[in-house]
Image (tube, rainbow, N blue to C red):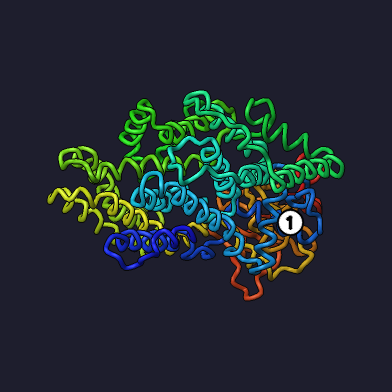
Amino acid sequence: MVRLARLVHAPFLSRRRAPVAGGALVLVAVVALAFFVDLGRPAFWDPGESRYAETVREMRATGNWIAPTLAFARYYDKPPPYFWVLAGSFAAFGRTEWAARLPSAAAAVATIALTVAFAWSRVGPRAALGAGVVLATTAQVVALGRSVRMDMLLTFLTSVTLLQSFRLLGADARPASRPYPSATWPLYAATALGILVKGPVGLLLPLLVVGAFVLVTRPPLRLARFRPGAASIVAIVGLVAWYVVQAVYVPDYLWTFLWQHNLGRFVGRALAGHAEPIWFYAWILPVTFLPWTLFLPGAVRRALVCARRGDRLAAFLLLWCALPFVFFSLSRAKLATYLLPIAPALALIIAIYLDRVRRAPAATRARALAAPALVWSAALAIVAVGAPIGTALTHPSYARAALAALPLAVFGAAGWQVRRHAAWRAVPALIAAGMLTLQVLFFRVGAPIVDDFASLREAARAADALPADALVFAYKTRGHSFTYYGGRRLLRVRSPIDVARALGRGAPTAALVKVRHLEAIGAHLTRPAYVWWRSPSGRALLANVPTPDGSGVPLAVPDAPAADDTPQRSGAGPGAEGAL
């Protein structure tokens, strides 16, 4: 953002620079709305956000910063450094949802600023700012930029590595007065940090892209430009030292993390989960990159034409998109978030394409922009009308909140006017404005509704009235958000009989269950149980003591012989599964 300010500053109000300055201010406003408005409003959602937040809570509680735990059992799925970042944010801003999501939001802003700064002198200010707007209004970028996940930080670090590699390769034409950059520390530091945050993929993805780019375009290699300086050597030594420390203090970490959660997920020989077919990303990418997916066919075609004509930037961006797509498609384990690192390249390809289309003859603009304008306007109109109706039919208690979607109908009408008057240059701005409005409405109105389905924060608050030593069991429901907000471990049981036995204990006891199992649980109760909390998602918190205010709904107790005082769990028989 500092570089942006310098580029548009002098003279700030000149006729030539005023539109650029205005565009930069618009981008700043879009980024602020996309990533910071209501950032801390939603609760931590299960399973992802709450898992990472709970891991940090346990790190702070135990003082164990080397070997992560979850439910105080080893958790080697992810490297610890990302949890250190979260812990630092908690220490600086308090243990809040806003503080936990701040690192991802900051990484998203940094990725956008880096992309715009890189593109500014290569494709022009309009396309550069357009790429920033595309990133700030892309569904997956916004979702992960506002989530407690490490994917956005990895995307930023991967982008630094790739863009610095492009500069050091001398792949773009530069005047003699502007020598190639000599600093190599961003390349090595970003790669080392990427490995620390996410693992070997922080090195592998850049290597694949840069290696393929060198083979395809054969730029003049000057390996001396990649010679590591003192700062680069410090980054490499720090990375090696970290893995040595892990190998000494937590010997099984390297095996579990590197094999099961990296190589094992790729080859499918470890019990890592997330198995998906090879075509998984063929439909996931168009969904996660909405609304700009509408322009992908034309943008990719144009980039291919430019690459065949010797445009190295176009070739680099295409390889940046294609190589990770193919790599993760070949992997046995797949998640939608794995493709986030290609978002900056896709944004640049689309922004460059739209910039050229805006300056093309009217007939070309109409062919390129008419269909996306129609599809997007119709989609928002359908959401504006369909969301309140669908919500009223399925969840009537949320029908009033769903009326907040009605303003989206304005964009449907605007799209019709754009088509009627052939104002095709306004289509990208219309799509961006519609998506930004949808984002703001979702996090202002929709996110609290999602809380009721995806978080157990309210259940944890209800359980605060239980004695501190009360046990809480769980049957066919789980959520680390309950542990994070309530500080209580969940002990898993396997059957309604086990739940009834747990609630039959003499000491105060609670159980998280699904509403559809209440009847089966009630059939085996030997003492009264009360519903302390019930969510629209069909989950309930039961306890064998009344609520302090007497509002708990009692379950019927059948005439039955007394059961054992202790449920089967954690090595005690067929119901055992231990703590969640």
Q: Where is residue 42? Give x, y as percent.
A: 52, 62
Q: Nearer the viewer, residue 262 or 19?
A: 19
Q: Please, what is the three-letter code of the amino acid marked with disc 1?
A: Arg
Q: Nearer the viewer, residue 163 or 85?
A: 163
Q: Is residue 129 above or below residue 263?
A: below
Badge 1 element: loop
User: How far across and how far down the image is residue 289, in percent?
Assistant: 41, 43
Is residue 399 among what the camera can see? no
Q: Residue at x 34, y 42 (%)?
A: 352
Q: Is residue 17 above or below residue 495?
A: below
Quarter of the figure with residue 222: top right
Query: What x and y, as percent, mark residue 41?
Result: 51, 65
The residue labelled by disc 1 is 489
Residue 331 visible? The answer is yes
Report how many numbered discs are placed on residues in the image: 1
Residue closest to the eye, 199 or 257: 199
Residue neighbourhood size for the residue with mark 1, other residues' Cα within 10 Å, grouped as few (<14), some (14–19), many (≥20)? some
Asked whether, in this view, residue 516 is left or right of residue 263, the answer is: left
Q: Picture coordinates of residue 40 (x, y %)?
A: 54, 64
* In this rendering, position of residue 392 left or right of residue 423: right
Q: Examine the image and state in which quarter residue 389 appears.
A: bottom left
Q: Name the outermost residue toward the left.
A: 421
The answer to whether 443 appears left or right of 127 in the picture is right
Q: Residue at x 47, y 52 (%)?
A: 112
Which residue in the rendered view is the most extreme toward the bottom? 549
Residue that protrudes farthest toward the right in the picture: 248
